[in-house]
Amino acid sequence: MDDVDGKPSEEPDADYCCPVCTRRMVRLEDADGALFWLCTGASRGCRVRLKDQQGRPARAYRCGHCGQLLCLRHGKHGKFWGCSQYPDCTQTYDDIDGRPDTGIR
Ligand SMILES: [Zn+2]
Ligand SMILES: [Zn+2]
């Protein structure tokens, strides 16, 4: 059984790795029955949790400053990508067709 934040997972899935720490991701269901992906490094401080998109973890983008994940936010001037570690990390990127403009294409 996989260790998921101290509890064994009922759904082993070797195919998807955490974009931040490269440990495996497991698919879980929250109290509302919505599926999501949790990093098996959660008990070791990794806070990565991704939405489920047709059975796969949603595409994730990493902050070029601290390496944690970016979140799409809606600001006064439209959509932009901010670091999930805000306010510890204030890195932001413009949104280009649903992707952060990190300079990497
Ligand atoms: Zn992780
Ligand atoms: Zn950051």
Image (tube, helix red, strand yellow):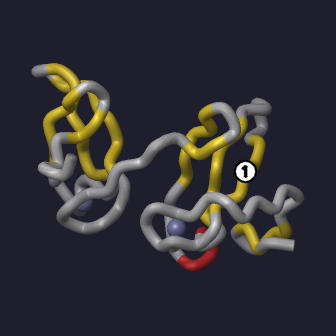
Mark 1 sits near ligand 1, with its Cβ under 8 Å away: no
Extreme-bottom residue of the structure: 44
Number of marks: 1
Nearer to us in this view, 58 or 76: 58
Residue visible at 79% across and 72% down in the picture: 2
Residue visible at 57% across and 79% down in the picture: 44
Q: For residue 16, what is the image quadrant?
A: bottom right
* Left or right: 48 in relation to 5: left
The image position of residue 82, as x and y in percent, is: 24, 44
Specify the quadrant that holds the N terminus: bottom right
Query: Vertical placement of 73 versus 29: above or below?
Result: above
* Left or right: 103 in relation to 25: left
Nearer to us in this view, 13 or 33: 13
The image position of residue 70, as x and y in percent, is: 32, 48
Q: Is mark 1 on a helix, strand or loop?
A: strand
- For label 1, count other residues whose C-alpha is less than 10 Å away and answer few (under 14), some (14-19) or many (20+): many
The image position of residue 5, as x and y in percent, is: 70, 69
The image position of residue 65, as x and y in percent, is: 18, 65
* Left or right: 56 in relation to 99: right
Query: Vertical placement of 82 versus 53: above or below?
Result: below
Extreme-front residue of the structure: 105
Residue tagged 1: 27
Residue visible at 76% across and 74% down in the picture: 3
Residue visible at 16% across and 53% down in the picture: 91
Q: For residue 88, what is the image quadrant?
A: bottom left
The disc labelled 1 sits on which kind of residue?
A: Arg
